[in-house]
Image (tube, rainbow, N blue to C red):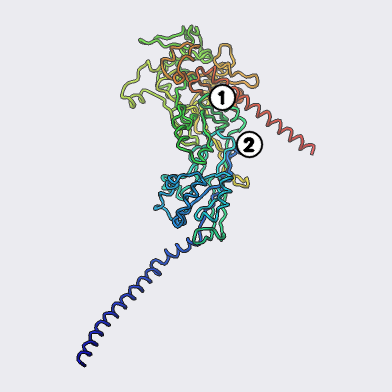
Amino acid sequence: MVELNTQKMEDFKERFRYLKIFVGGTFLMLLIYLWYLQVIKGPDFRKLSENNRIRIRSMAADRGMLLDRKGRILAHNRPSFDVFLVPEDIGRNPEILERIGNILDLSQEEIQEKIKDLKRRPAFRPIKLKSDIDWERLALLETNRMFLPGIYVDVNPRRAYHYGPFASHLIGYIGEVDETELKQVKHQTYRQGAMIGKYGVEYGWEAYLKGMDGGRQIEVDALGREIKPLQSVDPFPGHNVVLTIDSDLQRAAEEAYQDKNGALIAMNPKNGHILAMVSKPSFDPSAFARTLTSDEWNELNTHPFHPLQNKGIQGQYPPGSVFKIITAIAGLETGAITPQTQITCTGSFTYGNRNFRCWKEKGHGTINLHRAIVESCDTYFYQVGLKVGVDAIAHYAQEFGLGRKTGISLPYEKAGTVPSSSWKKKRFGTSWYSGETLSFAVGQGYLNTTPIQLLRLISAVANEGRLYRPMVVERVENIYGEKLKEYLPEEMGRANISEKTLRIIQEALLGAVNEPGCTGGASASKLVKIAGKTGTAQVIRMAADFKKGDMNRMPLKFRDHAWFAAYAPFEDPQIAVVVLVEHGGYGGAVAAPIAKKVIEKFFNLEVSTQAKSEETSSEDIYD
């Protein structure tokens, strides 16, 4: 019996030893796991705990304003009520998605689309559900605030453009920063959903306009409902950018276009300041600030006249007869012709097996260079082109900046094309034919220019050959009006042309607007003496076969482009203007009257400004 009890005790001790080892091992594992949770994972859990109690809400800075040269507001900010969702809180309250969808008129598919990238972002980072909600929805959300944990409304600045589509291609627009931009070094300070300049001045001066965002700490309960604010860092607004354009002149230019398409740019030829810039059709930049719908985006992209293109700096067109200025300069500078050189125009010029027509069916008779420019005789310049040759014409075109970008501080400028014998050999692998020189001499063929290049050409002719960089911004100011940066005129070169040649061309351009039989008579003004040159650029070759009165029979897309380039006053140029009307027909009939309205408006504004200045001075005296 004793032996049996002894055996049982031994068995129990053996089992108890294993039990102690098991219990000890279990406690050891618990201790190790507790150490892992507190020491290794402690910071992570502490962060999660804090996020469950404290949330960081960003506060977007007010974007700097855009002002015209007289300080009038073109772009500013207004409050926008935006609805945000915190994914972590919604995970505990999935029924909230259906409620918020009903209030915001969003389908569950749309909501899921917005939160589908949750795995790539922290669960506590808010997702914007809807921007700029109306007062009715705002009141509904605030009334039901306690029943919508994880949903909150924040007030953010929204870009507002004071005059809608007014100067939209110059001002540009903003939009949400995309994945590509976020990866760029210069945009690494931006967060998902932030607004950034995408086009125009909004894009080019983004660094000055954007400001510095702030933030605030909010204490929340376990359901994600706000309890109280803790602390905040106020945002700092961006700087204001003062443009070179004049709102009144810009409005006059846009109204002058009516329903036409094309481009107009006005510039001070003495410093390169852009006074007005129109590209038609235009767009409303406010639509981009609120995010375009797919239908709106498709409509803009498929529009036959490309409203998103700034035609003043991106549109490339044959310059037509405006280019005769270059051909005339090349003829005079090379000695191929003199001002007295006479050529007879019978209405056409036969070269090889082709008949090159003049725009005037019965011809201009025997005329010299001055009258050839005044009446824009094609036959005269066909023959001058043959005398000079393609490479000499190309050389003087390049002297005036054609074939290269002007350097304007706006994105996506095009360089155009100035052909030469070497250019054609490189491009097509074939030689230049002398017959191609005839088309080139009158601004057709392979030649392509942008409106701003022709503006700089006419400005250089008016300003002794000086080529200024076109400028769209005068200065940058802080919110207190203190000047931070000023953009001074930049002379980029001077055309190597004799003063005598320039004087001859200037006198001819004056005659092209004011003498009998001129092509630019529709721009002649009693207010100011205007000098300029018309141009009609063929879109297709068959356009030359239509008589003057028959242009309207052609489909719109095949009609000629209408050009006019001018400056005023003749004695002391203060404004230069180039007008392009796409498929408008004849430059003298369509483009010249538009330029006249803009030039006269400019001088009316100058007279008005001077009168106000004198009135102020008088008041100061009597004070």
Badge 2 is on which residue? 70
Left or right of 499, for residue 384: left
Of 213 and 292, nearer the camera is: 292
Pinpoint residue 416: horizontal percent, then vertical percent. Answer: 43, 28
Which comes before the other along the chain, label 2 or label 1?
A: 2
Mark 2 vs mark 1, foreground winner is 1
Q: Residues within 10 Å of mark 1 (few under 14, many from 20)?
A: few
Q: Is residue 432 above or below residue 109?
A: above
Pinpoint residue 520: horizontal percent, then vertical percent. Answer: 56, 17
Badge 1 is on which residue? 258
Left or right of 546, for residue 254: right
Q: Is residue 162 above or below residue 312?
A: below
Pinpoint residue 220: horizontal percent, then vertical percent. Answer: 52, 60
Of 95 and 466, nearer the camera is: 95
From the image, which quarter does the C terminus lie in?
top right
Mark-to-mark CA distance, 2 and 1: 25 Å
Question: What is the quadrant of residue 133 in the picture?
Answer: top right
Question: What is the quadrant of residue 546 in the picture?
Answer: top left
Left or right of 394, for residue 67: right
> Which numbered marker is on residue 436?
none
Of 354 and 390, nearer the camera is: 354
Amino acid type of the residue that numbered disc 2 sits on in the rendered structure: Lys
**Res. 475 visible in picture:** no
Residue reaching furthest right? 622
Q: Is residue 580 above or below residue 411?
A: above
Q: Is residue 381 above or below residue 88?
A: above
